Image (cartoon, grey):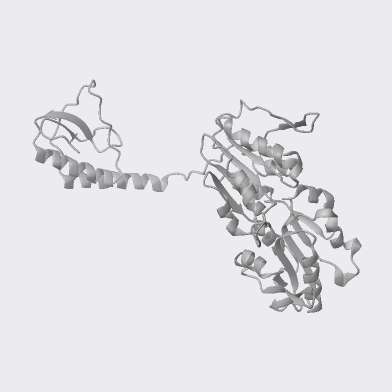
């Protein structure tokens, strides 16, 4: 609120004042009538509404500028504002567009993710790899050292993690909790595979929803100087798991489906592809991302003591059918789907999963060399490199083909 008559600030105007401004200068006056102060207030509001730059108030020690003309009337002030905006708009129309400056990211990684980290760095010139000494004391507990800890102060930092085994989670959690405290500008955790995602609900008293447990642990990551940690996860098993994370982290859920779409477009029979979902859960999870394809939905039904796969809707006859799901464990359901689709006339059956977990080397049952014949084979089995151990084991083994998340991760680090 403006002071009344005793000591009031106002704007005066004269042509050709400060370059780029409206010609207003603030002056202190004594005994100014309230009406004139109100006129100034209205003129100033008009300028602010037009987003015009107004000079700051001088300190009491600064000499006051000489008043050269009366305060501009609101209508004149508005006209001056419009003229100023027209000049700015004309300049913007001919200005060269500016490209968004990429953040320079210092990327640390766990030992399992070294190959993926190298691909991420190769995908962007804004990413520089950093290293950690992953050592152990004689008793087996971690003896860790973050290299260049002093040099990353004030910089953006990310960590690429793999929680493929409980044995390696603790050492990574230790690093993840330490990095934000090194006075860094921001921190991003990239966890391509959220391993406990399938254990997200309690079906009877005594069940432990370990998806909630892991989400709460990650929610306690300390804040960096830039604020909460961003947690990037690919194709989490159930989207409602986003609500398991606390307010101190920012979960960012990405998907590998664009990689699949790109690969499908390269197939010689790309116009003959049908997408199949092994169950209703997979359909709910992915059908909107694959809406441009014909769809087959399978379902497990009970026959006596057995649960078998049936086609619930859609027709695979004469089509190259691609089964899509978020992850595979033993692969039993995918195998049953492949047999049913082939029996109903599919000319080819392929599969895509973002996370190829394959415990106990269960991937072997899908290898072309181990198939019973052409009708028992997958044409392609696409996976991503979210599970590094699996990628190492099945690399270059038909029908498996790895679609790398590297470029997608590099893009996610710029969010």
- How many numbered tags mark residues here? 0
Left-right relation of 357 to 99? right
Quarter of the view holding residue 173: top right
Q: Position of residue 120 (x, y in %)?
A: 68, 44
Residue drawn 70% across and 33% down?
A: 131
Q: Is residue 107 visible?
A: no
Q: Position of residue 237 (x, y in %)?
A: 66, 58
Residue 113, relative to residue 265: is it above or below?
A: above
Residue sitting nearer the eye, 321 or 137: 137
Residue sitting nearer the eye, 122 or 234: 234
Left-right relation of 110 to 126? right
Quarter of the view holding residue 263: bottom right
Residue drawn 81% across and 67% down?
A: 335
Residue sitting nearer the eye, 17 or 54: 54
Q: Farthest residue toward the top?
A: 61
| Quadrant of image for the N terminus | top left
């Amino acid at each position: 609120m403006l002071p009344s008559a005793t000591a009031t600030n106002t704007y005066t105007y004269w042509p050709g004042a400060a370059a780029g401004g409206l010609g207003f200068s603030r002056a202190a006056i004594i005994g100014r009538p309230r009406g004139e102060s109100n006129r100034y207030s209205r003129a100033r509001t008009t300028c602010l509404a037009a987003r015009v730059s107004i000079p700051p108030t001088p300190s009491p020690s600064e000499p006051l500028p000489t008043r050269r003309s009366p305060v501009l009337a609101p209508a004149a002030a508005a006209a001056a504002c419009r003229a100023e905006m027209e000049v700015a708009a004309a300049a913007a129309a001919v200005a060269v567009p500016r490209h968004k400056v990429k953040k320079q990211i210092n990327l640390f990684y766990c030992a399992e993710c070294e190959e993926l980290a190298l691909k991420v760095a190769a995908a962007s010139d804004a990413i520089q790899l950093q290293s950690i000494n992953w050592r152990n004391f004689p008793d087996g507990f971690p003896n860790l050292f973050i290299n260049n800890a002093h040099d990353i102060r004030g910089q953006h930092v990310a960590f690429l993690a793999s929680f493929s085994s409980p044995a390696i989670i603790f050492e990574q959690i230790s690093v993840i909790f330490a990095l934000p405290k090194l006075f860094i500008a921001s921190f991003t955790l990239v966890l391509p595979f959220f391993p406990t995602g399938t254990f997200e609900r309690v079906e009877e008293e005594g069940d432990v929803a370990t998806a909630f447990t892991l989400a709460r642990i990650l929610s306690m990551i300390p804040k960096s100087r830039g604020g909460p940690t961003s947690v990037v996860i690919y194709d989490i098993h159930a989207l409602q798991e986003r609500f398991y994370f606390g307010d101190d982290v920012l979960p960012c859920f990405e998907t590998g489906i664009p990689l699949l779409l790109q690969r499908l477009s390269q197939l010689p029979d790309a116009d003959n592809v049908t997408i199949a979902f092994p169950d209703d859960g997979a359909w709910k999870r992915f059908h909107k991302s694959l809406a441009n394809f014909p769809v087959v939905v399978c379902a497990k039904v009970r026959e006596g003591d057995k649960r078998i796969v049936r086609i619930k809707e859609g027709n695979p006859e004469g089509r190259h059918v691609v089964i899509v799901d978020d992850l595979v464990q033993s692969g039993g359901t995918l195998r049953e789907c492949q047999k049913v689709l082939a029996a109903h006339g599919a000319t080819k059956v392929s599969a895509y999963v973002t996370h190829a977990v394959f415990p106990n080397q269960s991937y072997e049952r899908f290898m072309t060399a181990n198939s019973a014949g052409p009708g028992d084979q997958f044409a392609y089995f696409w996976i991503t490199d979210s599970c590094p151990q699996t990628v190492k084991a099945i690399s270059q083994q038909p029908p498996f083909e790895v679609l790398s998340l590297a470029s997608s991760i590099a893009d996610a680090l710029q969010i």
